[in-house]
Amino acid sequence: MDQYQVKEIKDRKIWEQFVISQKPQSFLQSWNWGKTNKLIGNKIFRLGFFRGKRLLGICLLIKQSAKRGSHLIIPGGPIINWDNQSLISFVSKEIKKLAHKEKVWFIRVRPELLDSQKSRQLFKDLGFVSAPMHLHAENTWVLDIVPEEENLLMGMRKNTRYLIRKSLKTNLKLQTTIDPEASKVLKKLQDETISRHKFVGFPEKLFRILLETFGQDKQAEMFTVKLGQETLAAAIIIFYNQIAYYYLSGSSDKSRNIPASYFLQWQIIKEAKKRGCQHYNFWGIAPTNNPRHRFWGVTIFKKGFSGRRVDWLHTQDLPLSPLYWLTYIFERIRKIRRSL
């Protein structure tokens, strides 16, 4: 019988070497994502799963003490061999032990595991249920940026290519920074975007900490587009192991008649290529091709740059307390109200 052990990993080098050696992998299980959440005020756990001295898997868990119920989340993980049934069973048991010790209502997981009947059945057999809400982007749009710039342009939708070229003939200027103070600019633009599209945004504290953690390690940068003294669009891009992630963004109402967003995306793609990235992850898109979905507009925008759809397994919950179902009902109602 396989003999596994679980140990807390305190060595950043060991953690990062394992994460970037795996495919697929995600910045959501990176050392800096754990650090970011710790600075936000969440309790984190970095577990390593070993057989002898060999590290076979890792799992970053984040404890969230929300009003709707204390719980552990595992974004983009665990990172393990999902064909190794004995390892999966061991990891599941160890995560449950930690959850009971922390007295949480449930565990919420959104693994970097492609959506399929096999994946859904795997988690069902472990006692999980389909979560009422998503955890980070599940339906994503990814562009291969290895080809030359002109080839990338030719692969785009005609209108997208036209607007990029039009933007290059304007007086738009690009600025980049890792200064945490720049978070105020992005927060203002995000607020304007929220007022237009009616979604729940992120706190400025997150923007600031991302630039302090990922930014200081050259794993993130904030891009802003200006016309004169007016900032029209901004985004924090995470660069992690040859993938650039379009993670957080915002735009001004004044940018709607100016191709600032197309200019921004093209500049990010070019910078990602310079950094040796092979893929550009546009992050979330609508889950279906329903034109009435609230994210349909941004989905059309992202798809215009060409690429392919990548659907990860929908978020899974492991109930550990009868109180979990109060959370389930609350989040189901909230999802309906937000038209998600």
Image (tube, rainbow, N blue to C red):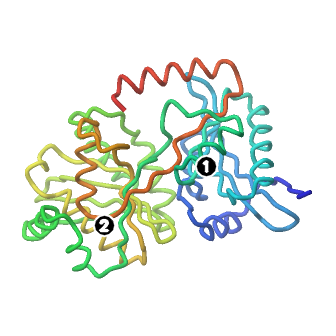
Query: Which mark is first along the chain, 1 or 2?
Result: 1
Q: Quadrant of residue 124?
A: top right
Q: Residue at x 41, y 60 (%)?
A: 245
Q: Position of residue 289 (x, y in %)?
A: 30, 44
Rendering quarter of residue 334: top left
| Residue 126 visible to the viewer | yes
- The quarter in which the N terminus is drawn is bottom right
- Residue under the image location 41 percent in, 39 percent down: 203
- Alpha-carbon distance for marks 2 and 1? 36 Å
- Rendered view: 305 above or below 193: below
Tell me which amino acid carries mark 2.
Ile
The numbered mark at residue 118 is 1
Q: Nearer the viewer, residue 117 or 92?
A: 117
Hey, what amino acid is under mark 1? Lys
Q: Residue 233's x, y, as percent?
A: 22, 53
The answer to which of 68 and 229 lies nearer the viewer is 68
Which SS class for mark 2?
helix
Residue at the disc numbered 2:
268
Residue 178 shows up from this direction = no
Q: Residue 160 vs residue 45: left or right?
A: left
Determine whether label 2 and label 1 are within 8 Å by CB.
no
Look at the image and tell me in which quarter the C terminus lies: top left
Q: Nearer the viewer, residue 22 or 1?
A: 1
Within 10 Å of the Cα at label 1, are there few (<14), some (14-19), or many (20+) other Cα atoms? few
Residue in the image at 75% along x and 44% along y: 92
Q: Residue at (22%, 80%) from the top-left corner?
A: 150
Q: Residue furthest bottom?
A: 148
